[in-house]
Image: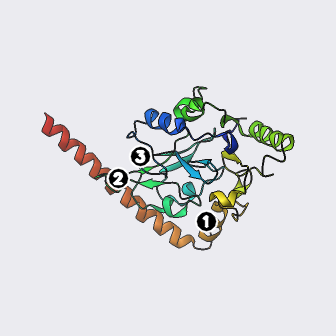
Amino acid sequence: MVSKKAMLVDIPLCIGCNACQEACKKENLLSEGEERKLSATAYTALESHKNDVYVRRMCQHCIDPTCVSVCPVGAFTKTNIGPVLYDETKCIGCRYCIQACPFQVPQYEWSNSYPRVQKCRFCSQRISKGILPTCAEACPTGATLFGNRDELLRTAYERLAAEPEKYIQKVYGEKEIGGTSILYLSQIPFEELGFKTQLTTVPLPMYTWNALSKVPTVVSVGGVFFYGIWWLTNRKNEIRKQTSNTERA
């Protein structure tokens, strides 16, 4: 059985040094510079709240991702080990993923001539080799822990039990929309930090498929339509590459 990887962010331990974002940008060849909000050039961002409370934002890598369920061409996939990955060669730019994400994570490259959807990749190329995600490796205080999800949940609850006066007695991400791979501990109520605390515990794709099952004809016709768009998009990219190669020759 493949163990699901996850990350535990202990907010009280974060000192706001931003080493996580700096390491992430370097690893993913993103433009340098501190960013406080997620963007096409910031896969992780560090928000500053009152009383020197710092909160990391990134893709939650949901256990049952909504972005995967709404993508009509399979550009998003959920890997067995944990990361939710994006294949730009399949993307048709519909941006359903952006609209569907309950955490407003995916970012679109509006300024790019050939725009992509950008978001944290959970350092899948590293963790597949047994190497820590670069943000966890860079964290100097242990505010970011990486490991097996079940083990991290045990660690989280041990901390809650050991210091009940320090932590809000909740592990955010354990059950929200079926659970996420990024888990949080906090010293103040999560809603005060901008977390959505009214989310269902049912995976959102369940609602997607329940709705689509009622309209099989629309789904099949829509699938053909989007396949056509995907084929045309890929064909256009192939022609562009061939033209570019011819000009260089």
Quadrant housing residue 156: top right
Q: Nearer the viewer, mark 1 or mark 2?
A: 2
Q: How far across and how far down the image is residue 30, in percent?
A: 40, 39
In primary-sequence order, the first of circles 3 and 1 is 3
Residue located 72% across and 54% down the image: 188
Q: Amino acid at mark 2?
A: Pro
Q: Classify mark 3: residues with Cα within 10 Å, few (<14), some (14-19) or many (20+).
A: many
Q: How far across and how far down the image is residue 153, in percent?
A: 77, 42
User: In the rendered view, would you say 101 is above or below 54?
Assistant: below
CA–CA distance in space, label 3 to label 2: 12 Å
**Contact (CB < 8 A) between labels 1 and 2?**
no
Residue located 77% across and 36% down the image: 151
Q: Classify mark 1: residues with Cα within 10 Å, few (<14), some (14-19) or many (20+).
A: few
Q: Nearer the viewer, mark 3 or mark 2?
A: 3
Query: How many labels sit on residues?
Result: 3
Q: Amino acid at mark 3?
A: Thr
Q: SS at mark 2?
A: loop
Q: Which residue is mark 2?
A: 115
Q: Which residue is mark 1?
A: 208
CA–CA distance in space, label 1 to label 2: 26 Å
Q: SS at mark 3?
A: loop
**Contact (CB < 8 A) between labels 3 and 2?**
no
Q: Classify mark 2: residues with Cα within 10 Å, few (<14), some (14-19) or many (20+).
A: some
Q: Which residue is mark 3?
A: 41
Q: Nearer the viewer, residue 110 or 36?
A: 36
- Tell me, for residue 19, which label it has, or none: none
Quadrant housing residue 92: bottom left
In primary-sequence order, the first of circles 3 and 2 is 3
In primary-sequence order, the first of circles 1 and 2 is 2
